[in-house]
Image (spheres, rainbow, N blue to C red):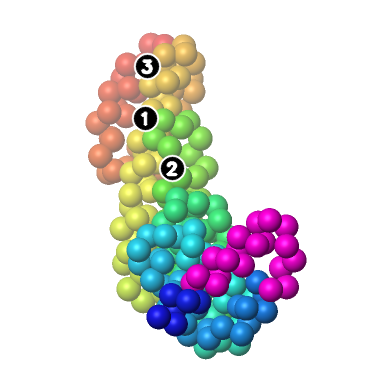
Amino acid sequence: MRRHLLRLLLTITVALACTGCPSFWNTELTKSSDPDELYKMAEEDFNNKKYGQAIEIYDKLNSAHPDFKEIPEVNLRIADAYFEQGSFEKAIDRYRKYAEHYPGHKGVPRAKFQEALANFNQIKKTDLDSAMVQKAARSFKTLMDDPEAGEYAAKAEEKYKECLKKLAEKEIYKAQTYINMGNYPAAKIAAKRVLEEYPKMGFDEEANRLIDKLKNK
């Protein structure tokens, strides 16, 4: 009942804010609220996939109760909520800030993994640019080599191998695209790069086929 009333009051203050009323009442209400109750409300919204509402309450908790015992976790959950929304750039920013502000917190290895995963999830299969894949690969490799990574080192290694496979796939895609464009020198370079930089990723046979096809081009 108490939590329901608090949620109702928060909803009213947000509505007042939207009408242009001063934020004083919103701030004062949040400050006077029990931080444990606010946290439970935010967690409830998060678990019900109401990520926008969860972020709003986490942010209020963050600003009104900076000394709350769960503040590191609150900041991590904000990043998680953005990630689940598919707002990957915002998630990356919040994961990074969380790791910088709370370097010794238990969630840092997971935050670094999630940051790399947010980059990974933005990879477009039909994009000639490999920058995003390389960025994700570097992030996963850094975590693999981190002695503090714990269980996330193995998870990062799996995703790193996926990145290498995607990089090889992109080079094949580049080679085929350049062939269609009549840019045979660039096609040869892309096909050879598969064998030299990303061997045994499942694309060696296709790379060799393209190189043979381009011998007289």
Q: Secondary structure at mark 1?
A: helix
* Residue drawn at 69 percent across, 73 percent down: 25
Region rendered in magenta: 7-25
28 or 66: which is nearer to us?
Answer: 28
Q: Secondary structure at mark 3?
A: loop
Q: Is residue 189 above or below residue 113?
A: above
Quadrant of the image for the N terminus? bottom left
Mark 2–mark 3 CB contact (< 8 Å): no
Say the numbered circle drawn on residue 172.
Answer: 1
Inter-mark Cα distance, 1 to 2: 16 Å
x and y percent of residue 10 in the render? 55, 70
x and y percent of residue 16 in the render? 65, 62
Residue 140 visible in the picture: no
Q: Is residue 67 left or right of residue 158?
A: right
Return the residue at label 3.
214
* Residue drawn at 36 percent across, 42 percent down: 166
Q: Is residue 105 above or below residue 91?
A: below
146 or 118: which is nearer to us?
Answer: 118
* Residue drawn at 49 percent across, 58 percent down: 52
123 or 63: which is nearer to us?
Answer: 63
Residue 77 visible in the picture: yes
x and y percent of residue 195 in the render? 35, 37
Q: Is residue 10 left or right of residue 209?
A: right
Inter-mark Cα distance, 1 to 3: 13 Å
Q: What amino acid type should be assigned to the residue bearing mark 1?
A: Ile
Q: What amino acid type should be assigned to the residue bearing mark 2?
A: Ile
Which of the 4 quarters of the picture holds residue 171?
top left
* Residue drawn at 46 percent across, 71 percent down: 42
4 or 52: which is nearer to us?
Answer: 4
Confirm whether the magenta stretch covers residue 16. Answer: yes
Q: What amino acid type should be assigned to the residue bearing mark 3?
A: Leu
Say the numbered circle drawn on residue 123.
Answer: 2
